[in-house]
Image: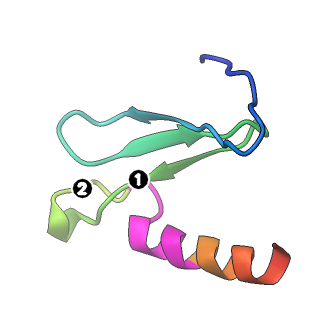
Amino acid sequence: MRRHKRMPGKIEVDIALIDPDGMAFEAHMPSGHSLVMDAGEDAGGHNLGVRPMHLLLVGLAGCTAMD
């Protein structure tokens, strides 16, 4: 995993395709946490992680409540 210098006003996240035959991505945050995003089997994914739209909605709720 690559490490990045944190620059004021910027947030960097490493994202990698982990399922070349599907749509799964793994994201690594500067905090050391990671998560997997994928589509459901009905949309060409393998159900390996959270759906991107669900993650977007959770992120919006978190930013609204915490920031």
How would you rate the neighbour count of disc 1 (Cα within 10 Å): few for under 14, some for 14-19, many for 20 or more? some
**Residue type indicated by callout 2:** Gly
User: Are the residues flagged by discs 2 and 1 in contact, CB closer than 8 Å?
Assistant: yes
Q: Which residue is mark 2?
A: 45
Assess whether residue 42 is covered by the magenta stretch. Answer: no
Q: Which residue is mark 1?
A: 48
**Residue type indicated by callout 1:** Leu
Instruction: State whether residue 11 is above or below residue 4.
Output: below
Q: Main secondary structure of the magenta part?
A: helix
Between residue 63 and residue 29, name the one nearer to us: 63
| Element marked by disc 1 | loop
How would you rate the neighbour count of disc 2 (Cα within 10 Å): few for under 14, some for 14-19, many for 20 or more? some
Quadrant for the C terminus, please: bottom right
> In x, y percent, where is residue 22?
21, 45
> In x, y percent, where is residue 33?
72, 42
Tell me what residue is drawn at x 83 percent, y 75 percent.
Answer: 66
19 horizontally vs 4: left or right? left
Q: Which residues are magenta?
A: 48-57
